[in-house]
Every structure is written in C-alpha cells, then in structure tokens.
C-alpha cells in the first residue's frame, strides 16, 4: 500500500536534527521504502510504500515511530513526540447515550462514537486545505477534512454523520442483503451484496457502507448543526471483500482490510472530538459509546539468542538485541538462553514467531551491517537429465546453420488453431484470457512457427529460417497436465534444405546413423499429405518433417510454402548414442557407381543396397532420372584390398534384388 | 654406346647439377645461355658432332634441348607463381549465421553462474496446482495475496504460474537437503505494457540446509550481482513482505549509470531511484513452507529468491531496449541483431 505524507506532518511526530535525506535513506534501509520525494513550495511530499502487513506504518505517526527507532539505532538523536497513544481519555458528563446494535460481534473489533452539537460547518483553514490537496485529496468542509487529516496523521479512519438526518433511537451494524441498495458520498448508487457491512438507522435508512464509504443519506453539509462521530475497527476480510466487489478502493478500506490497532481508536476519537470543538465550536452532547469486542491476549515469544545469531549469520549480544526490541516497543526480558519477548498490541497481527522477531532485530541492526558469509559449498544434486545441455547444443548448432531463435508466447488464438486444422477441444483454455490472441495453451509449436513466417512478410529478407524450443501442453487425464519440451525448425527455402539442416543437426548430435525418415500417414493435420515424413530414431517416433499443406498456408495469408520439422526434445534426450572408436582401415577404399531402376523410395533402395554386403561402408546418392537412380558405393575392408571381382559380384547381387 | 651419347649424357648431368643450385631468375637465365645460347654447350656439341647424316643424334639433341627448356620453364614458373589477386577489403557480413535469443542466452548465463557454486538447474511445471502455487506457499484461500487479478486460471485448481516459486515445494519433494536449486522457467501474468509481457521468465534460487542465514543470502546476491552485472556492483536489502518468506526482502542493485550516487551532473539519475535499481524479491523460507516440504523448520533453514530474466537482461547496461515486449517479437530484423 502506497501512502503520501508531507515532511511537515512527519516532523509533527518526529523531533530530530536529521535532514530529510538522512531520514528517507534510513527508512529505506530498515523500514518502509520511500519511493520518491517531491519538492513542494515550502514542504516535501513523500511517496512511501508501506509493507502490506505493517498497517501500523500507514500514517505520519507510524512512519515517525519507525524513523525514530531507526535513527536512534544509527546514533542520530531523535525523539517521538505527540504520541496519540498518550492522549488522555475524553472526559464528559453527558448522559445522553448513543445506541448501536452490532449483529455479530465479529463484525467490529471496536466501535467508538460520540455526538457533538451546535457545530459551525465552514471551509477548512488554508493550511488544512493545502495539506489535503498536496496528498491528492479534495477539501470538503472543516469536519470531513478533519477526519481525513486524522487518517493521514494516525492511520485510523473515522466518519462524521449529520446527526439530525439520522433516526438515532437505535443504530444497527449488520450485513446487507441482496436487493438492498444505497447512495454513496461519491454520488454512485450501488446494489449491496450479501455480507456487505452497513449501518442502518431506526427508520431503516442505510447510512454507511462500513469501512469503505459513507452514505449520502446522513451526509454532513453546510446546514449541518449536530454531528455524530464514529471511530470503528471492522472485520478486515469483510471490508476487503466489499471494497473489491464494489471497486471502491478508498484509503479507509485499504487500512481497515489490514486490521489497524483497536487500541488506537479511543485516542483518535478524543483527538478528533477535541479538535472539532476547537475549530467548529459546539459541545459534546453524548457520553462516549465504546464497544470493545477485542479479546486479544498478550503474545509472548521466546527468542533463543544462539538461534538468532545463526539465523542472521552474525553474533548479536543479548543487550543489543534487547535494546533493539525495546526501542520497537517490545518488552524483552532476559530468560534462560535468550529473551522472552512481549509483542506490543499494535504489532499483534504481524508478529507471530521467532522469525518475525529475527526480522525486527536484523533490519534495525541494519542489513547493510551484516557481513556476507558464503554458504558452505555443497552440491545441490545433478541438473535434471541432460535436457538443458541438449537444448544448448541444439541452439548453438541451429544458429550456426542460419536459423534464428524465436520465443513465442505459449498461448495461441482460436483462429490459429482452426487455421492449422487442429481441434479446439484438445487445447487447454484460459478462464480469464487477456485477449482473444492469447487464449489457448498450444499443443504444438507449429501454429506459432507458421505465424512467424507470416509476420515477416515484406521485411526484404527472402530466406527465412526460425527455430523455437518450448513446451507444449495437453491434458493427460483430468488431474494431470503434461508439459513436454519440443523443438520446431522452419524455413521457406525448401524441404530438401530443411532435411539437409536436420541432417547436420543430427550429425552434430551423433544421431544421424540412428535416424530414419519414413513415409507416413499419421502426420498432424497441418502437414501436406505427400511431402511429409516421420522421424524415427531407434524405433521411437520423435517427430515429423514436411511441407505445410496448401490450405493452411492460405489460411495464414502466406503465398510461399513453409517447411517445418517438429521434434519431441524429451524423447530425443532419451536417446543416448554410444560413441565408440572405429579402427581406420589401412586398405584404400574402392569407389564404384551403380545405376538402379526401381519404383521403391530412395530410402528403401538405400537400405536394400546397404544390406547387401558388409564391405559397403558408405553410399552416396548422386542423381535420378525418372525411376533410374545413380548411387556411388564406397567399399572398404579392414582386412585386405578389395578386388574388382568382389565389387562386381556385390553390384550384381544388388541389381538382382531390384529386378 | 656411341661416343656422342656419352658426351650428351655429361651435358645432361651437368645441367641437372646447375639447375639444382639455381635460386633466382638470373641463375636460370645464365643456365639458359650456358646450355642453349649461341656459344652454349649444345651448339658447341653440334659443332663437334654435326648431325648431318645422323638422324639418331639429331633426335637425341632435340630431346635434350626440349628437356632443358621444359625444366627451365618449370623452374621459372615456380619462382614467378602468383595466384590471381583477391581483394579482401570488403567489410565482413553479419547475416551469414542465424541467431540465438537474448533471453535464452541470459538463461544460459544465469545457469552457468549458479552452476559454479553447486546449484542444480531445474524446470518445474508452468501449469501447476493451487497447492504448489499458493496454498503450500503459505497463501491460504481468501488471503489478500491471492486476489491480485494477475493470475491466469485454467481450471479451479490449475493456474498458469505467475512466479517460479512453485518450484520450491517440488524441489523439497525431489531433493533432500542440502538443496541448492536454480529453477528457471516461463511465468505468466495478466499484464501487458512497456514493462510487462503476458509471458516472461523468472529464475528462482532456493537453498535449504542446516544453519542457512541472512548473511548467506546477502553473499549469494552479491555473487550474482558481480558475476552477472560486473565487478563492483553492490546489492542492498530492503524490508518487504511475502507470504512464503520470513523475513522478506526487496533486493536492490547499485545503479551503473550514476555509480550508485543517484545523481549525474547534479541532476537526479533517470535510470534509478536514488542510486539503486530494484532486482526483485527474496527472503528466508517461511517455516510453514519448510513444513509443507516435509522439512523440520527447527532443524533446517533456507533462503529463496525469484528474479526476472528479462528484468536482469534489460538492466544490464548498453542494450537500450526500452519496451520489454520487444523481446518477444519475431521480427527477423530484431532477432538477427543478436547472435
């Protein structure tokens, strides 16, 4: 939660010679962060980020209290003044009582109220108006402004009603019911929800949306004579729900939803009531209503000093620790092996265990005063498999082969799914997508890959090649979502070029001799039926390579074909090629060309040739004319020179298998 | 063998010797005159043994002449050989290779920096259950930390993780202490502006062991700052609050532009807040999280941090990318700039 306060109201509580820069730096190091300081004409405006669980800091007084402790620790003289907790209770002898019924005592931890009669409603003085404007609020009138300034000063919201507009016999604090509505001070009409806390008067008028905003019904205006002041502390969760639901994120709501200290409420009531009579005249016209539903028991936490030193990583003496805690209003007394620490009531919500105390001690001692200690070097185990190494290798190889790495968002649109002929139902769908473009978790990297080509049309580069590595996501069963790393590479320069690059990739990965590309009919829908092959390694299907079908290319508004290879990296990572040394033959290789006439696929012809003899250690494909194909055979033997007769016999055998 | 042949042989042998010792063009010219000149060995020979009426002799002499010429020519060629001139002065191109992505490279760097000090790299689910994402991290249902509006939901129980902290409990399940983890992965938030992309990357460090301290955390953040950003860069801790750490910190790193002073030429530095840049959150692992990871918080302690990959990438000086969303473009003119 961010708050705005001025230097002047901060110094109202903080008496120190320290300049503002010293104060803000000290706060940043050990307390709330001062994000920015804006120079005003004769003041400074501080933008402060109050840590969410430290509502006690959400005021000028709260910041001053922190600053005071921190400055003192640094040896800078400082004193906390005008402490509201030291305010004397309101003395009055009125017999008129305010009657408030609270439906469920959990609704309000504390509720104080008093009425003041015969007040003069005017504009606030210049100083007050100026202050409110500086912190971005609008001055209204002297009494409303007074409650707003009190919130700034003490962090305890309050509210004033026009008493004469209320039927005061009996006020009720209750939960609203669906169907009820009310008009708020900001002139909006809202439909109340079940559970919203409201105050209702005796005539069933809803006069307050508790903790969020007052109602228009009993608004203080220029004709108001008599007022009713309330200082409540509500159930934080209920205020949060109401404020979020109605989208009224008022300062009051932001404070109430974080549980301000109920013990501060009586002081604030007194301070405001006294100030009312001081600036607007009038007199107290009722006794003080004080409903106290707090049942907090004192919290005591044991702090073992040996543990503390180990946890912080720095030895702190008992006396030093004790002094820091006491400066923070804890009551620390020495006990066996450490300290017994009583938590002050205004820290009741955020201090729960010894780690919380360690934080208090360490931050005030100063994180910058802690000497860094490198943890003992130990192995955190082996990184998952070698998938990261594989990815790194693939990245380096493909980038060297002229492929550009892309990182696409893993979410795709309905249109992309349909354009690729994939099924919407196979995709996980976001319940609260930010846009139609990013709505479904991809089950393939291909839609994005095609999109990458589409997005680069007209950027002068004719040849485009991309690759991406990322997860694809699909539902395994109802309770299991599967994420698998995949690789996609794509180009627009040709399928054989793509195959060639894939070949180089596998070659670098020592896998090319294990890979076969086979004709298939099981390819995903976006691939062309003819020009696609599946990639098989050691009998495991790891992916596909092919041309994107014409319809899909047209759907993406492309006019050139795109060629794509997609691979399952997880499966690829499971295949560990064994690299063993092959002795080098001392006998020269014999090269012979062979012409084969066959309607089989080149892959099949190749494997048939290969199978014919162990002496053929390498086969180069040279060219084809119709179904006539030329291959160059490399014969080699580890044991002897190969004779013409031998190669002739093998060639005969090969030709025979194709006749 | 006729006598003239013996004589010719002598000349031929002498030529071999002379040729061998020749090292310059002048030497070769002299040899040419010595053998083929008007007063040369061969003409002198023909004066003694006229070829007329002896065709065998004529043939032999011609052969020797050719041989001498050929050898001289060959030696001359060797001495004078020059490849055709190649002009190498055109500037080098930088579009001959493809490119690796800036984010991937940053991830690799981060992995390497932490690998040196024994951190195992992990990758945990991007789609995870409420337990790992919130409940188990000490964020109970109904807690304000939940209604951030920034999380993408898939089902009631599955979210797209908005942070890599879901890896903490997974790691505690998979690896008993000592734990030294660096979990790098994709994260998602319902945000899109100059400093947010709906998808981004985080790296989550987790160390759990006996006697892990705040001082340890400080040393590791300093180690990262110096190794990633450069020697001399400092970090500081500011108090903060997260549900899954206690105490919690915001880590700042000293600004490079103003050398941590917050001022350049007596004008406030535009890059940072008074000399410091926000790196990200960190803290000592909350006892409830340790318990949820089946570790006894009275025996073990630990620290964790979760920082943005894109953030540290953009914070490194010199890159000058103003809009984080640029990192996710597929524009070849952008990608091609980073090899």
Image (cartoon, helix red, strand yellow):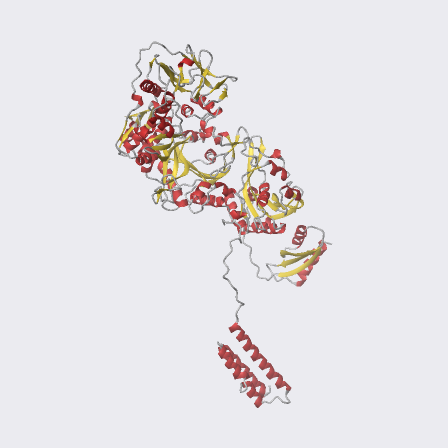
The answer to which of B275 and A47 lies nearer the viewer is A47
Within the image, what quadrant is residue A208 found in? top left
Q: Is residue B86 left or right of residue A318?
A: right
The quarter of the rendered structure image containing the C terminus of chain A is bottom right
Q: Position of residue A324 (x, y in %)?
A: 29, 30
Q: Position of residue B318 (x, y in %)?
A: 43, 47
- Say which residue appears at 55% left-offset and 82% top-offset: B12
Q: Is residue A193 visible?
A: yes
The answer to which of A29 and B217 lies nearer the viewer is A29
Q: Position of residue B26 (x, y in %)?
A: 49, 79
Count of numbered tags? 0
With respect to residue A520, does A587 lie above or below?
below
With respect to residue A605, does A356 lie above or below?
above
Q: Is residue B207 visible?
A: no
The answer to which of B20 and A466 lies nearer the viewer is A466
Looking at the image, which residue sits at the far right? A659
Q: Position of residue A362 (x, y in %)?
A: 33, 33
The quarter of the rendered structure image containing the N terminus of chain A is top left
The answer to which of B161 and A375 lies nearer the viewer is B161
């Amino acid at each position: 939660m961010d708050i705005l306060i001025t230097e002047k109201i901060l110094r109202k509580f903080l008496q120190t010679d320290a300049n503002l820069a010293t104060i803000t730096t000290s706060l940043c190091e050990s307390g709330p962060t001062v994000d920015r300081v804006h120079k005003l004409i004769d003041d400074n405006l501080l933008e402060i980020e109050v840590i969410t669980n430290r509502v006690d800091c959400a005021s000028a007084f709260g910041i001053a209290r922190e600053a005071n402790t921190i400055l003192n620790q640094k040896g800078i003289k400082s004193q906390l003044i005008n402490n509201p907790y030291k305010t004397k209770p309101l003395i009055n002898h009125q017999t008129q009582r305010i009657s408030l019924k609270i439906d469920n005592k959990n609704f309000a931890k504390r509720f104080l109220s008093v009425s003041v009669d015969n007040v003069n409603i005017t504009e606030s003085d210049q100083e007050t108006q100026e202050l409110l404007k500086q912190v971005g609020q609008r001055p209204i009138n002297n009494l409303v402004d007074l409650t707003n300034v009190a919130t700034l000063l003490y962090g305890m919201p309050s509210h004033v009603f026009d008493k004469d507009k209320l039927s005061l016999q009996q006020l009720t604090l209750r939960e609203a019911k669906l169907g009820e509505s009310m008009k708020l001070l900001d002139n909006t009409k809202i439909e109340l929800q079940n559970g919203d806390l409201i105050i209702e008067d005796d005539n069933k008028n809803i006069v307050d949306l508790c903790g969020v905003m007052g109602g228009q019904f009993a608004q203080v205006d220029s004709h108001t004579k008599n007022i009713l002041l309330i200082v409540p502390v509500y159930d934080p969760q209920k205020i949060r729900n109401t404020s979020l639901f109605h989208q009224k994120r008022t300062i009051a709501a932001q404070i109430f939803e974080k549980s301000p200290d109920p013990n501060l409420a009586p002081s604030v009531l007194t301070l405001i009531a006294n100030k009312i009579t001081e600036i607007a005249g009038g007199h107290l016209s009722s006794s003080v209503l004080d409903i106290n539903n707090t049942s907090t028991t004192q919290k005591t936490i044991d702090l073992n000093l040996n543990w503390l030193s180990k946890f912080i990583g720095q030895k702190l003496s008992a006396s030093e620790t004790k002094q820091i805690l006491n400066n923070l209003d804890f009551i620390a007394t020495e006990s066996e092996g450490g300290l017994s620490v009583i938590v002050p009531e205004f820290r009741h919500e955020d201090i729960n265990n010894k780690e919380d105390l360690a934080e208090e001690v360490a931050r005030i001692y100063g994180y910058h005063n802690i000497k860094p200690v490198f943890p003992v070097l130990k192995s955190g185990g082996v990184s998952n498999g070698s998938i990261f190494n594989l990815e790194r290798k693939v990245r380096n190889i493909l980038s060297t082969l002229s492929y550009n790495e892309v990182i696409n968002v893993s979410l795709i649109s309905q249109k992309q799914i349909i354009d690729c002929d994939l099924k919407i139902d196979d995709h996980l769908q976001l319940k609260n997508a930010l846009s139609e473009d990013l709505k479904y978790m991809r089950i393939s990297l291909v839609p994005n890959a095609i999109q990458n080509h589409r997005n680069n049309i007209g950027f002068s580069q004719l040849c485009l090649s991309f690759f991406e590595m990322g997860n694809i996501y699909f539902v395994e069963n109802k309770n299991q979502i599967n994420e698998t790393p995949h690789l996609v590479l794509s180009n627009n320069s040709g399928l054989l070029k793509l195959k060639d690059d894939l070949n180089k990739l596998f070659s670098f990965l020592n896998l090319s001799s294990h890979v076969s590309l086979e004709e298939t009919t099981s390819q995903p829908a976006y691939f062309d039926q003819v020009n696609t092959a599946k990639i098989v390694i050691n009998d495991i299907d790891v992916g596909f390579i092919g041309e994107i079908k014409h319809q899909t290319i047209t759907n993406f508004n492309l006019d050139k074909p795109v060629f794509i290879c997609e691979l399952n990296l997880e499966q690829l990572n499971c295949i560990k090629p064994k690299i063993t040394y092959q002795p080098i033959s001392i006998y020269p290789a014999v090269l012979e060309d062979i012409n084969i006439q066959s309607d089989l696929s080149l892959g099949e012809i190749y494997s048939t040739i290969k199978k014919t003899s162990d002496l053929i250690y390498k086969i180069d494909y040279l060219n084809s004319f119709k179904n006539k194909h030329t291959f160059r055979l490399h014969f080699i033997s580890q044991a002897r020179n190969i004779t013409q007769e031998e190669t002739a016999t093998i060639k005969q055998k090969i030709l025979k298998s194709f006749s | 063998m006729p006598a003239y042949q013996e004589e010719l042989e002598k000349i031929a042998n002498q030529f071999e010797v002379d040729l061998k010792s020749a090292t310059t063009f002048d030497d070769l010219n002299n040899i040419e005159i010595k053998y083929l000149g008007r007063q040369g060995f061969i003409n002198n020979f023909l004066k003694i043994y006229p070829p007329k009426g002896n065709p065998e002799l004529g043939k032999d002499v011609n052969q020797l002449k050719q041989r001498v010429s050929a050898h001289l020519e060959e030696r001359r060629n060797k001495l004078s050989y020059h490849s055709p001139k190649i002009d190498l002065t055109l500037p080098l191109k930088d579009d001959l290779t493809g490119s690796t992505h800036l984010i991937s490279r940053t991830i690799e760097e981060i992995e390497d920096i932490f690998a040196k000090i024994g951190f195992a790299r992990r990758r945990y689910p991007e789609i995870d259950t409420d337990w790992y994402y919130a409940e188990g991290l000490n964020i109970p249902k109904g807690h304000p930390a939940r209604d951030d509006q920034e999380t993408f939901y898939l089902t009631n129980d599955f979210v797209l993780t908005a942070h890599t902290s879901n890896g903490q409990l997974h790691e505690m399940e998979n690896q008993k202490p000592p734990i030294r983890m660096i979990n790098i992965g994709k994260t998602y938030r319902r945000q899109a502006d100059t400093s947010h992309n709906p998808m981004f990357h985080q790296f989550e460090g987790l160390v759990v062991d006996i006697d892990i301290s705040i001082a340890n955390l400080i040393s590791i953040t300093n180690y990262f700052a110096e190794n990633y950003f450069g020697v001399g860069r400092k970090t500081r801790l500011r108090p903060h609050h997260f549900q899954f750490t206690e105490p919690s910190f915001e880590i700042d790193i000293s600004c490079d532009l103003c050398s941590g002073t917050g001022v350049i030429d007596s004008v406030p530095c535009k890059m940072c807040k008074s000399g410091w840049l926000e790196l990200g959150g960190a803290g000592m692992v909350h006892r409830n999280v340790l318990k949820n990871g089946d570790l006894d918080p009275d025996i073990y302690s630990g620290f964790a941090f979760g920082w943005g990959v894109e953030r540290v990438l953009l914070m490194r000086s010199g890159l000058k990318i103003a809009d984080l969303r640029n990192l996710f473009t597929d524009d070849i003119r952008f990608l091609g700039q980073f090899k």
